[in-house]
Image (cartoon, rainbow, N blue to C red):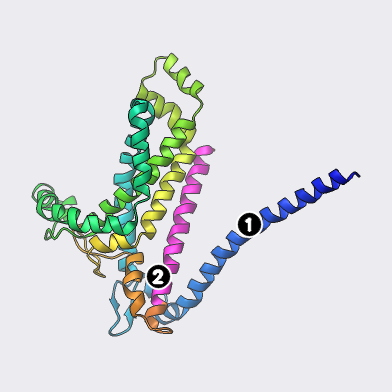
Amino acid sequence: MSASERNDRLGDRLFTGIAWACGMVVLLLILGIIAVMLAGGSHALRVFGPGFLVHAVWNPVVDHYGALAPVYGTIVTSLIALLVAVPLAFGVAFFLTEMAPDWLSNPIGTAIELLAAVPSIIFGMWGFFVIVPVMAQDVQPALIDSIGHAPVIGRLFSGAPFGTGLLTGGLILAVMITPFIAAVMRDVFNSMPAVLKESAYGLGSTRWEVMRRVVLPWSRIAVSGGIMLGLGRALGETMAITFVIGNSNRIGASLFSPGNTIASLIALEFPESPAGSLKLSALLALGLILMVISFITLACSRLLLRQRGA
C-alpha cells in the first residue's frame, strides 16, 4: 500500500470519526437538557403528581402550582399563529416565485429575510404600542358586535375589548413566524426543476393548477419542514408574547381573555424563584413539558409525512 493510499484511508477514518462525534454531541446535548429539566422538576412532579398537568392554579403564595393554564395558552396561541401565518406565507411565496417580476421579487425576498432577523423584543414592543390599541379600539369591538352573539362560536369572541389576550398574542406570533415559513417555501419552489412546471403548462394547466398538482406534491416534505420550523419558534417564543398576552394564569373560553404561555411564565417568574424552591422546580417542570410538546409536534409531522409518502 502506497503512502498516498494510507493517507487517504487515514483521512477517511478521521472524517468518519469527526462526523460521528458531531452527531453524538447533538444527541448528548439534547439528553443533557432533558436530564437537567427532569432532575430540576422532579420535586414539583413528586409533590403534585399527575395533577400538575391538569390543574390551572398557579399560586406562589401557598406554593400550589399547575401547568394547565400556560400549556393551554401555548397551544392556543401557536395554533392561531399557524392558521394565520401558513396561508400568508404561501401567498407570499407563490407571488414571489410565480407572479412577481425579478425587479420586484428580489427586494421583497430580501425584506422578508430582514424581517426574520428582527429581535423578538422589537415585535413585542411594536405589538404593545401599535397592535394592542388597534385591537382594543377597532378589531375586538367589531368581532364582538358581529360574531360575539353567535350561538357556539360567539364564546370565542366575547368579553371586554382590552386589546391584549390570546388572539393578540397569536397574531404577533404569526407576524414573527411568517418570514421563516415564506423564506423556506420560496427557496423550495425556486429549486424545483423547471421541466416539471413547463410540462404542466404545456398541457394547459393554469398557475394555480401547477402549484397545487405539481409544485406542492413535489415539495411537501420541505414545506412541512418550514411550517414545523415556524411552529417551533411559536411554541418557544418568550419576550414578544409576554408584552401582549396579558400574563394571567387562568383559562378563559374567549380568545380576548388574558393568558400565559410556558415560555412567558418562565421568563416572568424565574428571577423571583429561590434556588431549591418548589416554585423553581415547577418552572423547570414546565420547561420539560414544553420540550415534550415540541417533540410530540415533530413526531406527528414526521408521521404525517411518512403516511403521505407511502
Quick one: 194 or 76, which is closer to the camera? 194
Three-letter amino acid code at disc 1? Cys
Query: Which segment is the magenta one?
Result: 282-309
> Label 1 crowding class (10 Å Cα cut-off): few <14, some 14-19, many 20+?
few
At label 2, counting other C-alpha atoms closer than 10 Å, the crowd grade (few under 14, some 14-19, many 20 or more) is many
For the N terminus, give its image quadrant.
top right
Asked if the stretch drawn in magenta spans residue 224, the answer is no
- Residue 3 as seen in the image, left or right of residue 52: right
User: What secondary structure is found at the residue carrying circle 1?
Assistant: helix
Q: Residue at x 30, y 40 (%)?
A: 88
- For image coordinates 42% across by 38% down, the residue present is 185
Is residue 253 found left or right of 9 in the rendered image? Answer: left
Q: Is residue 61 above or below residue 6?
A: below
Q: Quadrant of residue 286?
A: bottom left
- Decide whether residue 304 is among the magenta residues: yes
Q: Position of residue 191 (x, y in %)?
A: 49, 32
Identify residue for label 2: 286
Q: Position of residue 153 (x, y in %)?
A: 19, 51
Query: Which residue is found at the position 29% from the left and 45% from the top?
Result: 84
Measured as percent of width and height from the top left, residue 34 is found at 51, 68
Looking at this rendering, what residue extends furthest in the left direction? Answer: 145
Q: CA distance from mark 1 to mark 2?
A: 29 Å
Instruction: Name the residue that disc number 1 marks.
Output: 22
Q: Is residue 300 above or below residue 103?
A: below
Q: Main secondary structure of the magenta part?
A: helix
The amino acid on which the numbered mark 2 sits, given as a three-letter code, is Leu
